[in-house]
C-alpha cells in the first residue's frame, strides 16, 4: 500500500503554494506569472505570508485579494499576532472576511530582525488569536506546526501540546515548517497521533534550489540536513550545469517520501517562483490542461 501511494499519487495529493507580497514592480510581475502558471495545479489554493511583526499588513491583504481573484483558487492569508494590537489583528481579519478571504493561517509571528521592537500588548500566543478569530466569523483556520520542534519550545512533546491547544481553540488543520528529512515528518505524524491529534497535518516542502541559502534557513530553524542531500548539493555547487536537474529531482523525491509517510496534502514554499513547483506538480500527476 505504501509503494502504491508512493508511485501512484496521480494528482490526488492536494497542493498549495506559499507566496510573499512583492516588494517591487518587477516582483509583482514575477508573482503574477507564478500565480498564472500554478493556478491549475494549486488544488488547495495559495497562501500569502505576512512580514515579521505585521510589517506587510497592507501588502499581504492586497496580494491575497489579487491572488484569489486572478487564480480563482482559495487563498489563505497569514495573520501574525506580534507587532499588532488585538484590535489591529481583528480589524485585519474583518477586512479579509469582507473581501471573501475566509481562510486564515493564525500565527504568533516573530520579531522583525531589523528593529528592537518590544513585544506589544497583543495576542501572546497563536492560540489566543485562533480563539478570537473563531468568535468573529466562521473562518477556516490553519495553524503552524514544527516537526522538528519550534526553536523556543523546551521539548517536542510540550510543543505538540501547544499545537493541540491551537487546534482545540478552533483550527482545522496545520501547515508544517519545512523539513529536509521526510522521516522527521513521519515521526512527527506518529507523535501527533499519540497526542490524540486527528486533523490533517500538512508538510511544508521547500523546492531544493539555491542550496547555500536553504542551508542557512535550515540552520536558523533547527532543521536537520541529511548528509546525502548536503553531499548532493555540494556537487551541484561545483557543477552548475547539474543544479537545476538535481533541484527538481531531489524536490520530487522529497515529495514522494512525504506522501509515503502519510502526507494528506503538500504545502510548497514557492518563494514566488514557478518552474520547480510546476515540474513537481506534473511529476505528481497533475496533467496540463
Ligand atoms: P505559537 O503557536 O504561539 O508558539 C510559539 C512558541 O510558544 C512555541 O514554542 C510554543 O510551543 C509556545 N507556546 C504556544 N502556546 C503556549 C502557551 N500557552 N504557553 C507557553 N508556551 C506556548 N512568520 C511570520 O512572521 N509571517 C508569516 O507569514 C509566517 N508564516 C509561517 C508559515 C508556516 C507554515 C510556519 C510553520 C511558520 C510561519 N511563520 C511566519 C513563523 C512563525 O511566526 C514563527 O515560527 C513564530 O515564532 C511562532 O509562531 P506560532 O504561530 O507557531 O506560535
Image: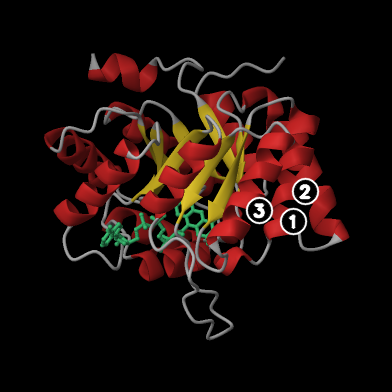
| Residue 59 sits above or below residue 76 on the image | below
Residue position marked by numbered label 3 in the rendering: 20
Secondary element at tag 3: loop
In the image shown, does 38 or 69 lie closer to the viewer? Answer: 69
Residue 224 visible? The answer is no
In the image shown, does 261 or 150 lie closer to the viewer? Answer: 150
Q: Residue at x 57, y 84 (%)?
A: 115
Residue 17: give x, y in percent of width and height.
58, 39
In the image: residue 18, left or right of residue 170: right
| Residue 95 sits above or below residue 50 on the image | above
Secondary element at tag 1: helix
- How many numbered dots are placed on residues in this image? 3
Q: Residue furthest left?
A: 194
Q: Is mark 2 within 8 Å of ligand 1?
A: no
Residue 120: give x, y in percent of width and height.
50, 73
Mark 1, Cα crowd under 10 Å, few <14 / some 14-19 / many 20+, is some
Q: Residue at x 75, y 39 (%)?
A: 65
| Residue 112 sits above or below residue 193 on the image | below
Q: Based on the displayed image, in which of its 4 quarters is residue 95 positioned? A: top right
Residue 139: give x, y in percent of width and height.
53, 33
Marks 1,3: beta carbons within 8 A:
no
In the image shown, does 113 or 227 lie closer to the viewer? Answer: 113
**Label 1 to label 3: alpha-carbon separation:** 9 Å
Residue position marked by numbered label 2 in the rendering: 62
Residue 277: give x, y in percent of width and height.
59, 38
Marks 2,1: beta carbons within 8 A:
yes
Q: Which is nearer the N-term, disc 1 or disc 3?
A: 3
On residue 43, which mark appears? none
Residue position marked by numbered label 1 in the rendering: 59
| Residue 55 sits above or below residue 197 on the image | below
In the image: residue 99, left or right of residue 221: right
Amino acid at each position: 500500500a505504501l509503494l502504491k501511494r508512493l508511485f501512484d499519487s496521480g494528482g490526488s495529493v492536494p497542493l498549495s503554494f506559499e507566496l510573499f507580497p512583492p516588494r517591487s514592480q518587477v516582483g509583482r510581475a514575477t508573482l503574477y506569472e507564478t500565480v498564472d502558471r500554478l493556478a491549475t495545479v494549486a488544488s488547495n489554493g495559495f497562501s500569502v505570508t505576512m512580514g515579521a511583526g505585521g510589517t506587510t499588513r497592507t501588502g499581504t491583504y492586497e496580494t491575497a485579494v489579487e491572488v484569489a481573484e486572478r487564480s480563482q483558487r482559495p487563498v489563505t492569508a497569514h495573520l501574525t499576532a506580534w507587532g499588532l494590537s488585538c484590535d489591529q489583528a481583528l480589524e485585519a481579519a474583518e477586512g479579509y472576511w469582507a473581501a471573501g478571504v475566509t481562510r486564515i493561517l493564525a500565527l504568533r509571528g516573530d520579531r522583525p530582525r531589523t528593529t528592537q521592537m518590544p513585544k506589544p500588548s497583543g495576542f501572546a500566543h497563536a492560540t489566543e488569536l485562533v480563539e478570537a478569530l473563531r468568535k468573529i466569523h466562521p473562518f477556516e483556520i490553519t495553524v503552524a506546526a514544527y516537526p522538528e520542534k519550534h526553536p523556543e519550545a523546551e521539548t517536542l512533546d510540550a510543543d505538540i501540546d501547544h499545537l493541540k491547544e491551537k487546534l482545540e481553540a478552533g483550527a482545522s488543520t496545520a501547515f508544517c515548517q519545512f523539513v529536509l528529512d521526510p522521516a522527521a515528518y513521519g515521526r512527527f505524524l506518529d507523535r501527533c497521533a499519540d497526542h490524540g491529534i486527528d486533523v490533517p497535518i500538512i508538510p511544508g516542502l521547500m523546492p531544493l534550489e539555491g542550496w547555500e541559502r536553504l542551508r542557512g534557513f535550515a540552520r536558523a530553524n533547527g532543521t536537520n540536513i541529511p548528509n546525502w542531500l548536503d553531499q548532493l548539493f555540494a556537487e551541484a555547487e561545483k557543477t552548475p550545469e547539474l543544479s537545476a536537474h538535481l533541484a527538481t529531482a531531489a524536490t520530487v523525491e522529497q515529495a514522494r517520501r512525504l506522501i509515503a509517510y502519510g502526507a494528506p496534502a503538500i504545502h510548497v514554499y514557492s518563494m514566488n517562483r514557478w518552474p520547480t513547483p510546476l515540474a513537481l506538480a506534473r511529476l505528481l500527476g497533475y496533467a496540463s490542461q
